[in-house]
Image (spheres, rainbow, N blue to C red):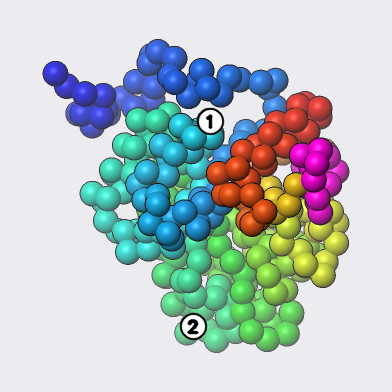
């Protein structure tokens, strides 16, 4: 008897197969609530302790997202399969596991491949070409984007000019693969919304956008930063660390944040990224999901 994975592999009808499958256990455990103006995805970094601790393999991440959390869209982190970017056998297995669980691969978060805003041209060129393999991997997995960083050393203006050039070159390559290059406010000068929005404006390409993260603004006003980055947003990261007794994020006003997101006309994925330590990773993700569903439902 042929099993479902073999069927998908041999006839290539993953999408059709998902559409005709009966109700799954996850559908029973996680019934649909009020339709939201956005879709929920799970950022793999939310489980980084579990993965680094050897309790969850990268290949099992899509299944865990669906079965444990009732989330059917995932955002990978390249650190967890860094040597597999060109391994088509591995990537095919990962894709099949996502298909088997009805999970959409949304994006790959790319770190450690060099500073795209380096003021040293040779270093910047190396960083750009280092990212090419992740563009190709994202395309293979059916993602819409890779998330990158606009980092470099120098004055804000120097890094800005370099980042515009580096991101522009990478975005040109990604455009030929129908992949977006999205930049997160991820520390340093990139955590200044006005600076990063100016960089993206300078790149001026349709497939180069932002991934506003609710929590990565540090000394910059987080609400102002998200508002500045939303016109370029092709993804949103819902950071959560601490929850109060009402289930709200203690340091981030999710109602205000989601109102900014909605008013910008955004209707895509909002990725849960839990980084707290008061709750376990599993319980923190569930708490963040409840918060997004509750506040998102109020605003939808």
Is residue 16 among what the camera can see?
A: no
Q: Is residue 254 magenta?
A: yes
Tally of numbered tags:
2
Instruction: Choose the circle earlier in sequence order: 1 or 2.
Output: 1
Residue 111, above or below 25 = below
Depth check, front residue: 61 or 12: 61
From the viewer's perspective, tell me whether residue 192 is left or right of residue 81.
right
In the image, residue 161 lies at what x, y percent? 67, 76
Give the position of the C terminus as an image quadrant: top right
C-alpha span from label 1 to label 2: 42 Å
The magenta-colored residue range is: 244-261
Which residue does the numbered mark 2 point to in the structure image?
123
x, y percent for residue 34: 70, 20
Visible in this render: residue 118?
yes
Q: Circle 2 — which element?
A: helix
Identify the element where label 1 is drawn: loop
Q: Position of residue 237 (x, y in %)?
A: 66, 49
Q: Residues within 10 Å of mark 2 (few under 14, many from 20)?
A: some
User: Who is closer to the viewer here, 199 or 9?
Assistant: 9
The structure residue drawn at horizontal position 75% and vertical position 47%, both measured from the top left corner, is: 243
């Amino acid at each position: 008897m042929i099993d479902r994975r073999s069927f998908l592999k041999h006839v290539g009808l993953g999408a059709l197969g998902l559409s005709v499958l009966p109700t799954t256990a996850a559908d029973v455990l996680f019934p649909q609530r009020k339709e939201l103006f956005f879709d929920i995805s799970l950022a793999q970094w939310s489980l980084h302790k579990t993965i680094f601790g050897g309790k969850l393999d990268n290949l099992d991440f899509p299944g865990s997202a669906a079965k444990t959390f009732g989330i059917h869209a995932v955002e990978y982190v390249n650190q967890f399969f860094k040597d597999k970017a060109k391994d088509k056998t591995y990537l095919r297995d990962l894709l099949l596991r996502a298909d088997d669980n009805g999970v959409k691969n949304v994006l790959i978060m790319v770190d450690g491949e060099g500073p795209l805003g380096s003021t040293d041209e040779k270093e910047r060129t190396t960083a750009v070409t280092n990212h090419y393999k992740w563009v190709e991997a994202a395309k293979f997995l059916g993602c819409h984007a890779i998330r990158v960083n606009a980092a470099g050393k120098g004055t804000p203006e120097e890094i800005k000019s370099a980042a515009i050039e580096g991101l522009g070159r990478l975005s040109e390559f990604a455009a030929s693969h129908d992949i977006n290059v999205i930049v997160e406010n991820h520390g340093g000068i990139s955590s200044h919304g006005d600076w990063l929005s100016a960089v993206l404006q300078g790149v001026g390409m349709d497939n180069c956008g932002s991934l506003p993260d609710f929590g990565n603004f540090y000394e910059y006003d987080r609400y102002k930063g998200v508002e500045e980055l939303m016109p370029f947003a092709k993804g949103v990261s819902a950071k959560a660390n601490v929850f109060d007794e009402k289930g709200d994020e203690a340091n981030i006003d999710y109602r205000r944040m989601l109102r900014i997101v909605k008013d910008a006309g955004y209707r895509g994925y909002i990725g849960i990224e839990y980084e707290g330590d008061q709750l376990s990773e599993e319980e923190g993700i569930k708490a963040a999901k409840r918060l997004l569903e509750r506040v998102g439902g109020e605003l939808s």
